[in-house]
Structure formats: C-alpha cells, structure tokens
Amino acid sequence: MRSPEPLAVTWSNEPSPQFIADARRVSATWALPLFERPHKRGLGPQLGVVANAFLVRGGQGWSLVDATGALGVSPGLAMLRLKRLGRGTQMPDRLLLEAGIRPGEVVVDATCGLGADARVLASAAGPGGRVIGLEASKPLAVLLAEGLPLETPWPSSGPIEVHHADAETWLRAQPSRSVDVVFFDPMFERTKKASPAFDELRRFANSRPLTRAAVDEARRVARRMVLMKSSDPALFPALGLEPVAPHANAFVYWGRSTVE
Ligand SMILES: C[S@@+](CC[C@H](N)C(=O)[O-])C[C@H]1O[C@@H](n2cnc3c(N)ncnc32)[C@H](O)[C@@H]1O
C-alpha cells in the first residue's frame, strides 16, 4: 500500500467551480498532489491514507486540515494591532517601535508564519515599500501565500511576497545591503502565555533554533537593522544581537543589531 503524501490540495465538500479551479492551480504551482474530493464527502477517512494534511479551498478561503483540526489564515490579529495604531493609543505597536520602519522600505520577515507581523510591517512600509516573507514550512508558506490575495488589504499597505524558503539559505543568495530590515521571530518553547492559535501553528511549523549563521547573513544583507523577537533574552548574545531594555512584566524580548 502507498504511504500517505505529507500534504495534498483539495476543495470543500460543496465546492464552487472557482474553488475547484483554485485547488487545481495551487496543486500545479506548488507541485502538490491534488485530491479530487467527491461531493459531500468528509476528509476524515482520507487523512493518513491519501495525505497526512490537506490544503482545502472553501468558502473561508484556504485552510490546512489534519487529524488534529483546521488552521486558517486570517488578518484578525494584525487588524487589531493596526486599528489600535489608527486610534493613536498610548501603547505603540512594539514591533513598529523597535523596527522604526519608514515608508518605502524593503523588510524581510524571515520567519513569517501566518503573517500577522508581516501585515503590520507592510502597513508601515506602505505602497512604495514591500515585505518579503520567508517561511520554511511548506504547508504554512502555501497557506499564507494563497490566503493573502483573498483578503482585503489594509489601506495603503505595501505588498507582501511569500517565499517557501529557509531564512539562512535565502539570505545567503542575496546581495549585501539589498534590503532595509531583516526581522526574525523564530519558534520558542511553549510558555503559559502561548495562545491556542500558536499551538495550532506549531503542528506545522519549523521548530529548529535560529542559527548564528542566519543572523550573520541578515547583518550582511540589511542596510539598517536586524531585529529579533524572542521569549528568551539569553539567546541574543550568542546570535550577536544586543538586547533591548525590556518593558515591565515582559514575556517577549527584543534584540537587535543596527547597521547604520
Ligand atoms: C513564531 S512563528 C512566526 C509568527 C509570525 N511572526 C506572525 O506574526 O504570524 C515562527 C515561524 O517561523 C518559521 N521558521 C522557523 N525557522 C525558520 C527558518 N529558518 N526559515 C524560515 N522560516 C522559519 C516557522 O515555521 C514558523 O512558522
């Protein structure tokens, strides 16, 4: 018997012609097997037989379904942060505060996950700038790359291009000083503060620790700054990053290396 594919593409149980066309296109573009799902059939019996996970095109856009549940891509968290910024609250967005993104800048989100930070960075880079999102997990990269174009973008945001790539490998192939900022937000051990959404992401994410070589490449490629967010400030010195003074009761810490 054939072993299941790691990942396949299909459509919802009552698909529109558009969903079927999208699933066919994604299968061809990303070199993923297509499962031609019979009408009104659940995916349960196919999980672990045809594939261990499915990218499903349905009425809510794309979702990633495995035996544990479904993971969708949504602008929700980024929108909350952007709305707060728009209201000019006293609490600035910490990522934008630390990165100081200027309109027109090119920002690499080297560990972009489901793109909450990438959407916030794109809003600051504006239409004259852009965000390049790197994601080492193929299921997550496809989910975000195909999900983003189905969303209504935040007004005056720059584009976000998603690449399925390991950060170190991708950065190594770039010319020196070719982007403004490189941002890392690698996976960390589960803490009490981890949200259910983060646990869902973890099922598909690349959990290998960030390497010093990746950060050194980022320092070569960045014109202005390398920035990292982490739950463990002890990681920064070994990666050649300077810790930023934490806020009171912080459970997220920031480290950076300024190039300018
Ligand atoms: C904590 S999540 C990022 C969340 C993201 N900042 C957001 O706002 O949604 C870390 C992501 O980085 C990815 N990742 C880990 N190591 C990577 C690497 N070396 N290159 C590219 N992506 C990586 C993981 O697969 C995971 O999706």
Image (cartoon, rainbow, N blue to C red):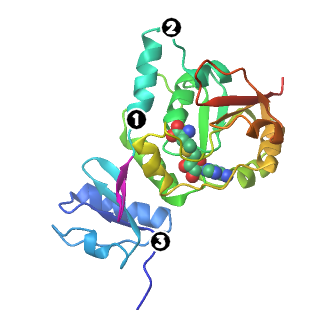
Q: Residues within 10 Å of mark 3 (few under 14, many from 20)?
A: some
Above-or-below relation of 52 to 131: below
Secondary structure beneath label 3:
loop
Where is mark 3, residue-wise? 6
Residue 3 figure quarter: bottom left
Q: Residue 172, position in %: x, y?
A: 79, 51
Where is mark 2, residue-wise? 90
Q: Who is closer to the viewer here, 62 or 30?
A: 62
**Looking at numbered disc 1 in the image, what kind of residue is underneath it?**
Pro
Secondary structure beneath label 1:
loop
Identity of the residue drawn at 50% across and 52% down = 202
**Looking at numbered disc 2 in the image, what kind of residue is underneath it?**
Gln
Q: Residues within 10 Å of mark 1 (few under 14, many from 20)?
A: some
Give the number of the disc on residue 75: 1
Residue 66 covered by magenta stretch = yes
Q: CA distance from mark 1 to mark 2?
A: 23 Å
Camera-near label (3 vs 2) is: 2
Secondary structure beneath label 2:
loop
